[in-house]
Amino acid sequence: MCLGRNTVVLECAIVTVNERKMMQLMRDHARNYGEDMELEEDFGPEKRIGPFIIKETILGEGTTGTVKLAFNSCTGEFAAVKIVNKSISRKVKEAKKEIKILQKLRDKDTPLIPLEHVEEDSHNIYIFLKYMELGDLYSYIEKTGTFEESEAKKLFRQLLSAVEICHKKLKICHHDIKLENCVIDSKFNLKLIDFGFAVKIETPETGDTAIEIYDGSPAYSPLEIILRRPHDESVDIFSMGTCLYYLLYGCFPFCDPDRTSIDELTANLQINDLEFPPGFSTAVEDLLRRMLTKRKSRITLDGIRGHPWVNTA
């Protein structure tokens, strides 16, 4: 426990010990994962928010703001902090939506990223989240290469569990599932992040079931989003399929984001001619075909959960 302000000397001593620990942790992190971190004894530029020291180390860019490395001087643990500029009303709205969603989660072992703390000042909202030291899956694959089928299966099962919680418990469509929004720790535990585009799932009893929001990432999006047509939460299933395809093959199924135009992507999605490089099972190919298809033919979450590929070791 961090001591109160009435014990200034002891509190400062604890912070000093923990900040030394921070230095060693950051050095270990840089050495273990090949990151080029320049570490100075005074930690370089930093900002303090409550018990947290916010570093200039950028971990990523979310839909609502920049994500930086933070250190909790009371617990001696790292955190990831999403910094949201309050002058941009759209980002503030998305940030508040994300906070509200994550505050509903009681289980810290959930495959959705746990919320640790929220602060704000006159300029920013600070959303402190669990730190996942290996970062996002897209960047990890870019550095280390694709996964063996058995390892991809372990990651995909965790993503499936995360989406099941979104759809069945939280009653939301994530609407931006991608490898950049799947972060992993050193034991390859996966957490789904970034709920700024999430949409509440309506039911026939509560209202119109159609979703008419078209945010998302084109490389992971099904035809109905690209064509800006009303859709449902099954768009998340298509995006999951895209993630699985990339985990195995190291490319997107219908486009090269650096070269393919939206018109070309639309045509590719309409033709729906999937190619599977050799070396993987027919079972995973079957699952991918069922996920990466048009809305009416797309497999359900329950269908994925019961698919032979997901259920075999």
Image: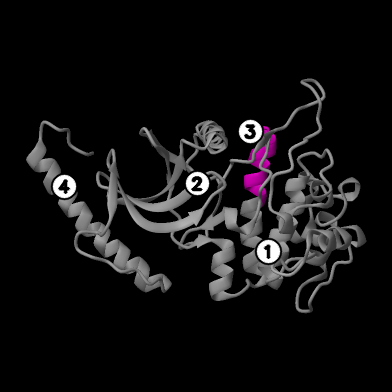
Task: Pinpoint residue 18: horizontal percent, then vertical percent.
Answer: 21, 52
Q: Main secondary structure of the magenta part?
A: helix
Mark 3 residue crowding within 10 angstroms, few (<14) / some (14–19) / many (20+) = some
The numbered mark, 2 or 3, whose residue comes first in the sequence reads 2
Q: Give the distance between the C-alpha atoms of the residues marked 1 and 4, in whole angstroms.
A: 47 Å
Quadrant, the C terminus: bottom right
Disc 1 marks a residue whose amino acid type is Ala
What crowding class fits label 1: few (fewer than 14 Cα within 10 Å), some (14-19), or many (20 or more)?
few
Frontmost of labels 1 and 3 is 3
Q: Residue at horizontal 49%, vertical 34%?
A: 106
Estimate the x, y position of residue 282 in percent, counting from the top left.
83, 69
Question: Earlier along the polypeptide chain: callout 2 or callout 4?
Answer: 4
Instruction: Tell which circle, 1 or 4, labels the residue nearer the N-terminal end.
Output: 4
User: Which residues are drawn in magenta?
Assistant: 160-171
The span from disc 2 to disc 3 (Cα, nearest Å) is 23 Å
Label 3 sits on a secondary structure element that is: loop
Q: Which residue is mark 4?
A: 14
Q: Is residue 89 above or below residue 228?
A: above
Q: Is residue 79 left or right of residue 244?
A: left
Quadrant of the image for the N terminus?
top left
